[in-house]
Amino acid sequence: MSEDEPPIQYYEVIDYKTIAKRGVWWILLALCRDAQYEKTFLAFYKFQKRKGPDGEPQWQKKSSFRWNNIEHVPKVVETLQALTDVWKEQEDELGTTQGNEQE
């Protein structure tokens, strides 16, 4: 496995997209296949680079979350967009409030 491939065990990685990779943290979204049950799923993975048994640094899974039902994905995308819009509004309000206090 190369440094650029996510170290996902047990499942075939069909494709993946890195969300963030900084320092000792790597967060990604992966499309995987479970060969045993012949199921495909999406999963968020968070890896941390730590010393392995041989003393060399390696990526180790810190947490993961998977979607097994493709019908849920549009609702997840819709919800992410809605919450992101609220987040942006709050950031804009904070920026405006902070800007007024400085004048």
Image: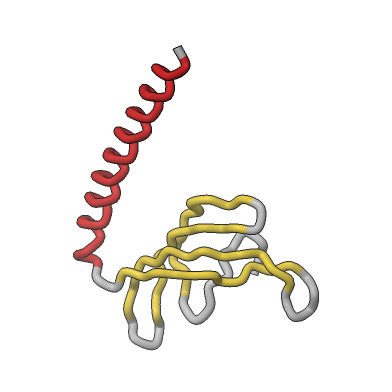
Query: Which residue lies at the image location 22% right of the left edge and 64% below the top edge?
Result: 72
Taking the image as shown, residue 1 lies to the left or right of residue 33, namely right
Residue 65 place in picture, x, y as percent:
39, 69
| 103 is higher (above) or lower (below) than 73 | above
Place residue 5 in its image quadrant. bottom right
Q: Residue at x 53, y 50 (%)?
A: 20
In the displayed orientation, state which residue is furthest to the bottom: 36
- Colour scheme in use: secondary structure
How many numbered discs, if any? 0
96 over 90 or under it: above or below: above
- The x and y percentages for residue 2 are 66, 64
**Furthest residue toward top:** 103
Which residue is at the far right? 55
Q: Quadrant of the C terminus?
A: top left
Q: Nearer the viewer, residue 85 or 91?
A: 91
Res 101 quadrant in image: top left
In which quadrant is the N terminus drawn? Answer: bottom right
Residue 62 appears at what percent x and percent y?
A: 54, 70
Task: Report the front residue among 65 and 83.
Answer: 83
Q: Quadrant of residue 29?
A: bottom left
Image position of 60 (left or right of 101): right
Give how far across and how far down residue 43 sits, in percent: 40, 67
Residue at 32%, 35% (x, y): give it: 90
Q: Residue at x 31, y 43 (%)?
A: 84
Relative to 94, 75 lies left or right? left
